[in-house]
Image (tube, helix red, strand yellow):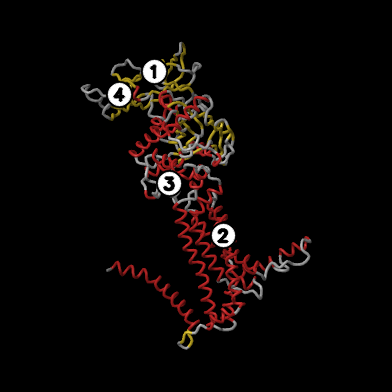
Amino acid sequence: MIQTPHIPIASIVETQNLARDNTPAEPILSIDHVTKRFDGATAVSSVCIDIMQGEFVTLLGPSGCGKSTLLRMIAGFETPTHGRILMRGEDMSHRPAYDREIGLVFQNLALFPHMNVFDNVAFGLRARGRTDGLKAKVQDMLALVGLDGFDDRRTGQISGGQRQRVALARSLVTQPDVLLLDEPLSALDLKLRRQLQTELKRIQQETGITFVFVTHDQEEALSMSDRIAVMNAGRVEQFGSAVDTYHRPATEFVARFVGETNLLRGQVQAASGGRVTLKLDNVNATVTVPAGDSSLGLGTDVAISIRPEHMTLGTGTDQPIAATVLSHSFSGATITYALDSAAGRLLAQVPFQPGGGHPLPAKASVSVGWADTAVTLIPGKPGHSQSDMEN
Amino acid sequence: MARTLRSALLLAPSAVLIGIFLIGLVRLIASSVLFDGQIDLHHYVDIMNRPDYIAMLGRTLRTAALTTFFCLLLGYPTAYYVARYQGNRNILLLLIIFPWLVSIVVRSYGWVVILGPRGLVNGFLMWTGMADRPLKLMYNDFGVVMGLVHVLLPFMIIAILSVLMQISRNLEEASMSLGGHPFYSFRTVLLPLSLPGILTGVTLVYLMSTGAIVTPLLLGGLGDTMIGTEIFQEVMHFFDYPKAAALATVLLVTAMAVVLPLQFLERWLSKRLTDGAPS
């Protein structure tokens, strides 16, 4: 990395934007078919992800899905069993952590307990021998995270949220190519977490540094990320924008893990003109939905995913699925109904119209449908998941 | 009232212990200076006037320093390895503590078998022709230091281990992720944080090796005794208790002369290291 003299954050952003314009195609971080096995157990399985300069990418998945292992491989604490990790096109797979231009915010923060705030933040600059203008750089960074004047505080004397900020400042001050964050907010209470999410996003945009954020919280992932890699059992099930991840889930796992959804299974009966007609399991109904990009043979098992908020409720028989109301919950703007149907338990979230009468009572008969555009067709047998889905 | 009584009762055993220890210490010093109710320092004057005693004192301190140094050199990496061991750490701990199950006399004699003129090492060297007559590996300072390091190493390992176990592996990783090479990370993170353990280990090993009796007796040279051995002989062979007491007091004072500054050094160092790493 180039020795940068002390320059204000705004100009850092500018230079990095310039750098981005010059080399638009090359990803700053490339995970190239990376596999990691521990004693025969596969933690990460043939993962491919390209991350661009300045992106906020989230690795999202349940615990044990391999997201932390992947992060540790990017950091340089684990070596891939197969595959390569490239940064700016250079193979990093076997480089030790201290020779990579990365920053890492640990889940437990790992602040140095024997140093004050200033020395914690200054650590990376000193370790790399970049001591020119050290004081100003550290203080700029402390200002960026909102901790001016905290220089002399001991890490034990400050609050949880302030400790997060110190950890962030410490790993950002060296201006790493990529900042890795390993569930840094999981230990905080909800209010503080929301506040720090906004802060993180602001700091990421101000510095223009590429963030790779690990979390199991799908709301956190959706609200912060440019792109999300949803991981399950060591594989990336889908890598796409937050909107795509939610509205165009590639697999059943993604549909279920990211937000609530209704999954209906069936077989392809006919396909023509960009639409497929499905015979739904357990329900005496055929539905026609947009085929999307997939081309499916007749008889193929598929599932369709419809988010609760895209379900429509009717009282007649004009809609494909008959159901009965089990219960409802009212949340101000909307009412969410839990419904029982031959296709299984369904959720429908409908807008609440003031003056539109009372919520439907339990046991009321309804019919359920959806808007055409809200349906996502997920190919594959139940439980089967696709790997290496890439944009 | 009841609470005060309970505290007093709980304190009683340690008070008794400290009391007995203090009485012993006072009587030891008294027996070296009080003769017929008069203060008489002639034993101390004698000690100071005997070059062989001064040499013995110097040898004792040097042997203790060397023993401590080698214990630290061997003990720190061992403690680190155990602290970061992924498998069953208890097995390693057992291996470290295992020698304590064997009497110190037996352990020291073990070295005679290994280092003696007809011992394993010399036997091998002469058999291979690398030496044509036995090397003098024991009955000298080398043998004593070797024996003492063996006997005292577990103390050093455990003192350091107990501190290293408290230091999260993440701290070293944090240092590395910030560009700290392994040695830099060691110097700026691990070392300052483990300093309390190091100083505890150093103090323990140093104190125990200054007072060592058995190992120098078995492995040391005839002419170059250590002060602990000398005290032992004054008591057991010559029944000269006042002189032994005087020697013991000298040993105590010289040991304190090293250990007390060490305690201050610990405070000074940890303050310095916590206030800021060198830039």
Identify the disc placed on residue A118: 3
| Amino acid type, residue under disc 1 in the picture | Thr
Q: Does the CB distance between marks 3 and 4 fall below 8 Å?
A: no
Say if labels 4 and 2 share a chain. no
Query: Which residue is found at the position 54% from the left and 38% from the top?
Result: A100
> Which secondary structure lies at badge 2?
helix
Of residues B152 and A195, the one nearer the viewer is: A195
Marks 1 and 4 sit apart, C-alpha to C-alpha, by 17 Å
| Amino acid type, residue under disc 3 in the picture | Phe
State the residue position of label 1: A373
> Which secondary structure lies at badge 3?
helix
Q: Looking at the image, is A268 positioned above or below residue A172? A: above
Q: Looking at the image, is A232 positioned above or below residue A189? A: above
State the residue position of label 4: A350
Question: Tag 1 or tag 3, which sits nearer the N-term?
Answer: 3
| Amino acid type, residue under disc 4 in the picture | Val
Query: Which residue is found at the position 37% from the left and 47% from the top?
Result: A158
Marks 2 and 1 sit apart, C-alpha to C-alpha, by 71 Å
Marks 2 and 3 sit apart, C-alpha to C-alpha, by 32 Å
Marks 3 and 1 sit apart, C-alpha to C-alpha, by 53 Å
Residue A281 seen in this snapshot? yes
What is the crowding at mark 2: few (fewer than 14 residues within 10 Å), some, or many (at least 20)?
A: many
Say if labels 3 and 4 share a chain. yes
Marks 4 and 2 sit apart, C-alpha to C-alpha, by 71 Å
State the residue position of label 2: B72
Q: Residue furthest bottom?
A: B36
